[in-house]
Amino acid sequence: MMIRRKKIYDGKAKTLYEGPEKDTLIQHFKDDATAFNAEKHAIIDGKGVLNQRICEYIFQQLEAIGIRTHFIRSLNMREQLIHKVEIIPVEVVVRNMAAGSLVKRLGLNKGDTLSETLVEYFYKNDTLGDPLISEDHITVLGWADEEEIEDMRALALRVNDFLRGLFANANIHLVDFKLEFGRLWENDTVEIVLADEISPDNCRLWDKETNDSLDKDRFRYDTGDMLEAYREVANRLGLMTQSGRDDIAGPVLVK
Ligand code: UDP
């Protein structure tokens, strides 16, 4: 018998299903790759499995240093059991070097180092193309209060400090990345926790020697094999099992 699960939300790279326990969801990582607000789309066989594995590892490491996330445990190679949270409609982008929209918006040079870590906020709204917003927009429009913004900012900077080190050990520059946060209600208390995912889909990761992109920019700008880059990231983080590729390859046709 097929077990049918209730779909809660179908996103560009992930689907959320109702979870098996109260206040939980299942986060399913798809093979879909999208860019430029979904104008560009492709199916990259095995991407979901790699992102799930990388995200699982990063969230577990963050939990180990006391940063709460929505992650509970992995269920299989593509799916995670997560806490149901109330997503704050703000994308928090952390930047260590200039790249992407920052370069375009302010006329900087790609790869410029920033004197300090820069935190930016974008309104999470596909119809509007995720516009850049200020802290005032967030409070005035009621998306989060001042205390919550302070929590998001502090958490984002802690995540950045930790991830910079983690990737530096893998000979990778963490150029920038995007985070999403949610409110986790427990009895009468509410806490801001890290939600969504952290993977090469929402980070810029440059090889320290060559400055090669090991992230979604390969797909955005057709500059190389995306899956190979994601595999390289997983490998450098020590996440590939001995069977390596076989674990993440799709079904094999038996003749
Ligand atoms: N990012 C993301 N989702 C978005 C927008 C950005 O994950 O909807 C990530 C992106 O991968 C990069 C960082 O946030 O690591 C900064 O992205 P940027 O603002 O430069 O936008 P881009 O030009 O990449 O769309």
Image (cartoon, grey):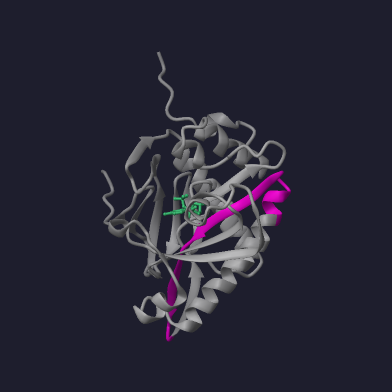
Which one is in front, 54 or 23? 54
Q: Residue at 36% across / 60% down in the picture?
A: 19
Q: Residue at 48% across / 41% down in the picture?
A: 49
Residue 183 left/right relative to 240:
left
Residue 10 vs 238, above or below: the answer is: below
Residue found at the far top of this picture: 255
Quarter of the image for the N terminus: give it: top left
Q: Residue at 62% across / 61% down in the picture?
A: 160
Residue 154 vs 74, above or below: the answer is: below
- Looking at the picture, how far across and down is residue 194, in whole percent? 50, 66
- Looking at the picture, how far across and down is residue 184, in whole percent? 44, 74
Quarter of the image for the C terminus: give it: top left
Residue 237 vs 7, above or below: the answer is: above
Asked whether the viewer can see residue 240, the reply is no
Span shown in magenta:
165-188
Residue found at the far bottom of this picture: 188
